[in-house]
């Protein structure tokens, strides 16, 4: 199966005021094969959206980006090359569908503009079929509606329709269900999975919600303070998490059989992006810490999982 996206040693620094450096991405590595989903999970501020923004070549000019992005048959791709295929070969959906649409134009006018840019022929037929494919039963009414006339769930489906108009090779979904209630969120996840099965695009699925990532993804990458600390097939990571942070994160999933379904928080906080992290960034919160953890942890292979830790053993 061909690799659609390979991210190698991705790092991002921002120069903020007076030359002070903020280093929110410190080492992100993964690849995604055609038709497969990689889920990125981690606490707020750990660098999930930044990873997507860097892949799309959309970082602000204050950012310094290092590492390599390889995409489909383009090989290593520059931000300029990415700009040429962004919106066609790679598309994105995100948390707030309202921000994907201009409130003063109908959905139909906006989808038509995108279809024209993509050179699609017979636009009316394509848009109707596309809206039906995302489960909108009355496409004509949706096309004639303004964004505020649709519910959050319907607008989310319109955003998915827009992202898939160009038959992308990769769909990046950044917290696509976070703003929706649980039932609608589940329906959207099922919809995306069935569209992926039918259309074969690869997906990068980003969420702070491990349950949503586990439902959606073939592989999971756990990110902490800008580094991938564990990556492997979803079943392996969920059944047998190896990194102390992954174990803590899975312990924090609310479940019916845990007392009162309350979250078990991991003690401590994610280090500030301004803190110069020497060695393992999780050390302040880790009960397994040893002296060597002051140095950059090695990547240890355990079965099909890769884990950045001094203590776990293969
Ligand atoms: N334009 C910027 N300038 C400086 N720092 C930035 C900028 N954008 C992001 N950052 C830093 O990058 C870090 C990671 O942000 P990111 O948005 O990727 O987090 P996230 O994992 O997506 O969190 P959330 O779950 O809240 O969406 C943040 O802590 C923030 O300080
Ligand atoms: S490297 Fe050390 S501090 Fe970091 S997770 Fe492993 S044991 Fe804990
Ligand atoms: Mg984010």
Image (cartoon, grey):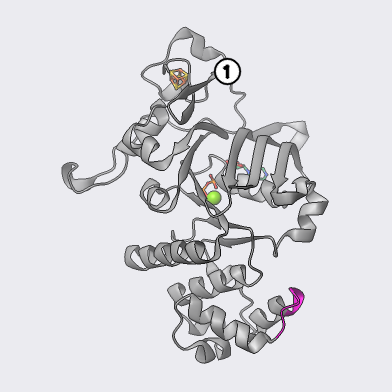
Q: Is residue 179 visible?
A: no
Q: Secondary structure at mark 1?
A: loop
Q: Is residue 120 magenta?
A: yes
Who is closer to the viewer here, 121 or 139?
Answer: 121
Magenta: main secondary structure equals loop
Q: Which of the pair 166/226 is nearer the observer?
A: 166
Ligand 2 sits in which quadrant? top left
Q: Which residue is mark 1?
A: 296
Question: Which quarter of the figure has residue 20?
Answer: top right
Q: Quadrant of residue 262?
A: top left
> Where 198 sits versus 124, above or below?
above
Residue 299 shown left or right of residue 152 in the figure? right
Residue displayed at 77% across by 34% down:
18
- Residue 254: % across, % down: 27, 46
x then y, percent, for residue 177: 44, 61
Of residues 24 and 194, the one nearer the viewer is 194
Across and down, in percent, residue 268 comes to 40, 29
Tell me what residue is drawn at x 67 percent, y 85 percent.
Answer: 123
Q: Residue furthest front?
A: 1
Read off the magenta span. Answer: 116-121
Mark 1 C-beta to ligand 2 under 8 Å:
no
- For the point 48% across and 75% down, which residue is it? 134
Q: In the image, what residue occupies the spot 63% across and 67% down? A: 167
Residue 263 position, x and y percent, is 29, 42
Query: Relative to residue 312, is residue 260 drawn left or right?
Result: left
């Amino acid at each position: 199966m061909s690799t659609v996206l390979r991210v190698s040693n991705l790092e991002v620094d921002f120069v903020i005021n007076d030359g002070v450096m903020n280093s929110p991405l410190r080492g992100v590595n993964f690849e995604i094969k055609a038709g497969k989903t990689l889920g990125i999970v981690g606490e707020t501020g750990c660098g999930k959206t930044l990873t997507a923004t860097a892949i799309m070549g959309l970082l602000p000019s204050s950012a310094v980006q290092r590492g390599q992005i390889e995409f489909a048959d383009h090989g290593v791709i520059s931000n300029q090359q990415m700009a040429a295929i962004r919106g066609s070969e790679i598309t994105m959906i995100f948390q707030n569908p309202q921000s994907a649409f201009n409130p003063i134009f109908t959905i139909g006018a906006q989808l038509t503009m995108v279809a024209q840019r993509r050179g699609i022929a017979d636009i009316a037929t394509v848009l109707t079929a596309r809206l039906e494919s995302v489960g909108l039963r009355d496409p004509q009414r949706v096309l004639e509606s303004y964004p505020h006339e649709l519910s959050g769930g319907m607008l989310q489906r319109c955003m998915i329709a827009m992202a898939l108009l160009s038959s992308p090779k990769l769909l990046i979904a950044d917290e696509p269900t976070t703003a929706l209630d649980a039932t609608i969120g589940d329906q959207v996840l099922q919809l995306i999975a069935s569209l992926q099965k039918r259309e074969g695009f690869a997906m990068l699925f980003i969420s702070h919600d491990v349950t949503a990532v586990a439902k959606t993804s073939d592989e999971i990458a756990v990110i902490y303070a800008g580094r991938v600390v564990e990556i492997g097939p979803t079943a392996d990571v969920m059944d047998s998490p190896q990194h102390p942070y992954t174990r803590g994160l899975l312990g924090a999933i609310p479940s019916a059989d845990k007392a009162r379904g309350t979250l078990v928080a991991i003690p401590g906080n994610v280090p500030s992006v301004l803190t110069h992290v020497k060695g393992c960034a999780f050390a302040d919160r880790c009960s397994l810490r040893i002296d060597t953890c002051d140095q950059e942890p090695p990547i240890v292979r355990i079965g099909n999982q890769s884990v950045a830790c001094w203590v776990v053993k293969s």
